[in-house]
Image (tube, rainbow, N blue to C red):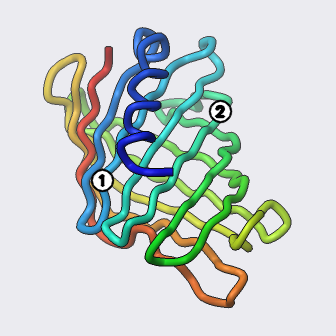
Amino acid sequence: MKAPFIAALLLASASSSVMAGGVAFRFGSDSFGVSVAGDMSPESSAQLDWLHHDDDADMVALGLYANGQRGAVSGRVGAKAIGLEGDDADVNGGAVAFGGDVSLPLNEIVRLRAGLYYAPEATGFGDIEGYDEWSVSAEFSLFQNSAIQIGYGSMDFDADTGKKFEFEEGAFVRLQLRL
């Protein structure tokens, strides 16, 4: 999978999904990504992500989630299938990760977010024996249909060679457009 092909595929599939959700662009020190998300119903959602790492690796994830709210806290739990092709890292394969993310509004403008996903060895295939992802961030509403998220996170793949491929580790900025 090459980056331009994945980007074109993501944008083509976005045309119908975007009407029910939005598009986001993520920038990290070593990566760039695009997400398309949408509600399938009031209680469920789906998200398609593509991220490119500067070591010539591409990651694609498709997640299905159950959405919920408990008091002021909203969130989602579910599973996502993750595929990785790492040319320079020489790691290819994927995993099915389980987890979720939560959101707590502090006021009309600021919202705190956190997420955690984990894929055990049993759900990995190819060169992948596991996956873990976590993030914490603050989201700031720009307008009623856009927000910027500033955070810190990690995405790590466990390879069958005993090594870890650190797809992302560090600060990120995410621009969300709700369409």
Residue 135 location, quadrant: bottom left
| Above or below for 14 versus 30 | above
Name the foreground residue: 39 vs 140.
Answer: 39
User: Nearer the N terminus, badge 2 or badge 1?
Assistant: 1
Amino acid bearing label 1: Phe
**Pointer 2 residue:** 65
Q: Residues within 10 Å of mark 1 (few under 14, many from 20)?
A: some
- Assign a secondary structure to mark 1: strand
Q: Is residue 120 left or right of residue 64?
A: right
**Pointer 1 residue:** 32
Residue at the extreme right of the image, as rendered: 122
Name the foreground residue: 42 vs 30.
Answer: 30
| Above or below for 16 versus 64 | above
Q: Residue at x 64, y 77 (%)?
A: 158
Residue at the extreme left of the image, as rendered: 142
Q: Position of residue 35 (x, y in %)?
A: 41, 36
Q: Residue at x 79, y 71 (%)?
A: 121
Name the foreground residue: 164 vs 146.
Answer: 164
Q: Position of residue 157 (x, y in %)?
A: 59, 72
Name the foreground residue: 161 vs 76.
Answer: 161
Q: Position of residue 29 (x, y in %)?
A: 23, 67
| Above or below for 161 versus 150 | below
For residue 94, the mark is none
